[in-house]
Amino acid sequence: MRSFLYKSLVLGVGLGMSTMGQAAPWVDSSDIYLRADIQALADAGVITVPVNTYPLMWAGIGADLAKVEPATLTPALTDAFSRVNFYYRQAIDSRGNAAIKATAATDAARFQHFGSDYREKGQLSASYEYVGERFAFKVAGTGAYDAQDDENARLDDSYMAVVLGNWIVTAGAVQQWWGPGFDSALHKSNNARPMPSVMLSRNNAAGFETPWLSWIGPWTLTAGISWMNDDRAIEDTLLWNLRGSVRPFKQLEIGLSWTTQFCGEGQECDFSTAIKSITGQRDCRNDTGEGCSNYGNQLAGWDIRYSDLWFDVPVGLYMERKCEDSKGDPWQIVDCAVLVGADTRFNLAQQQYKLFFEYTDTMVACGSDPNVFNCFYEHSTYLSGSRYYKRSLGSTYDSDAKVYVLGLVGQFADSHGINAYLRYAQLNKDGKSPSHGWAPQPAKEDLLMLELSYRMPLLKGMMTFGGTASRSEFDTDNDTDASLFGSYEYRF
């Protein structure tokens, strides 16, 4: 009887989500509801692989799902398991998947979070995905109206991927998200559009079998090179990416990440210079008395998430720390921004909710004067900094910001869902910006914003609508603003 009920539940969930499937070798960073379910299963130990690096490969998740007896799970976890298992089955069983999505908004989105619903005032996207046993590709095109970066035609999210043993080689423009945050991330997030990249990632994150290394637990590794082909101070800069994570026991996940910008127009770009940049070596050739400097523009750090039950209430605590420089050795990193957060989940009838709080601080002083900022995401040679089309690769609030966010993700029957964000942000808190013109020049602003969105199936597709209401205080005046948006996606 229990087995029959479970099968009926899976079927019901599958029918309810039949318009929401995705065919890809991985989970991307476009669906906050799916991520909430994956995190809930990971916190409960159902999923054992690290889950805070996106794209997140399906192979390890699928192996964990196959070991689960749903009858042993709570009703809420059974619902989460059913939804994740549905997406996984659709991803591995599908051989072709086309989609069309249209979005209209009164204003372009100001901030981007995990699974953001839209970016520009108007967007029309079409895509086709194919997933085989060892080969996958996606062809995607987007037309944007009144684009913030003036790029009205885009190939974002297009890729080709091939599985080689337990590794996936990917070429294309795939969004990356590094870290446990839901509202933002300091190193890689959805804030900037994806860059053309060639990446190598571990497919199944299963741990080592040898006793010498099995204590590490399941582990992930991704590395590759991105081409920063936007209009920037140094054209054609390259970005080396490296990210690894381990999960030594079910309550704990630790991630390490590092990037460095190198090459580009007018810069040394031979093999030895690239190796020096990638290996973090220092340039001590100058005789100005200012000491040594690192090759390239580096950003490195770590993140950690711990989860447990406190008085039968699920609680997660996480922190991300990313740094601009080091005092010599690679592990002596300094000039660091931080993100800290806490989350829980609860149920009301057949509704599941995730509630989280995050604090982001990118108010970093990199020099000897602790009151001089304009440092994080900046560089004296690569003046455009760690940005792509003038949006930071990490925090959606850029540098010199302190932000508090209370977020809620709710999932209901038949694929209905809601997410909400209440933000208080102190943006460009020192009121200054670099004068070279290649960095954003925002005004000093205290912002209170409420962002809401709701999704629901409609006409065999998925409709999402919502908006924002905000109050801004500047040095000279105040401003109240509101926006609305709606989107519709159809897959076939």
Image: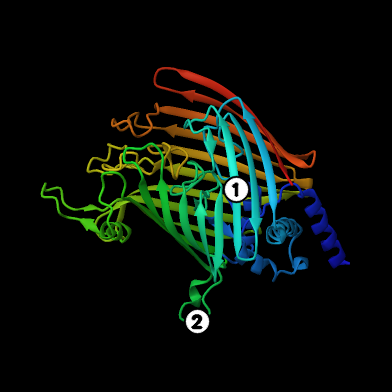
**Quarter assignment of residue 332:** bottom left
Give the x, y percent position of residue 33: 66, 48
Badge 1 crowding class, 10 Å Cα cut-off, few under 14, some 14 to 19, many 20 or more, is some
Question: For the point 57% across and 26% down, which residue is it?
Answer: 107
Quick check: 258 left or right of 481?
left
Label 1 secondary element? strand
Frontmost residue, 486 versus 172: 172
Quick check: 226 left or right of 466?
left
Amino acid type at image mark 1: Val
Q: Mark 1 points at which residue?
A: 139
| Residue 60 visible in the current orientation | yes
**Quarter assignment of residue 27:** bottom right
Label 2 secondary element? loop
Could you give the CA–CA distance between mark 1 and mark 2, rounded to whole angstroms?
Answer: 41 Å
Residue 220, relative to residue 54: is it above or below?
Answer: below
Quick check: 347 left or right of 324?
right
Quick check: 389 left or right of 177?
left
Q: Name the residue under label 2.
A: 210
Give the x, y percent position of residue 95: 70, 58
Frontmost residue, 273 versus 117: 273
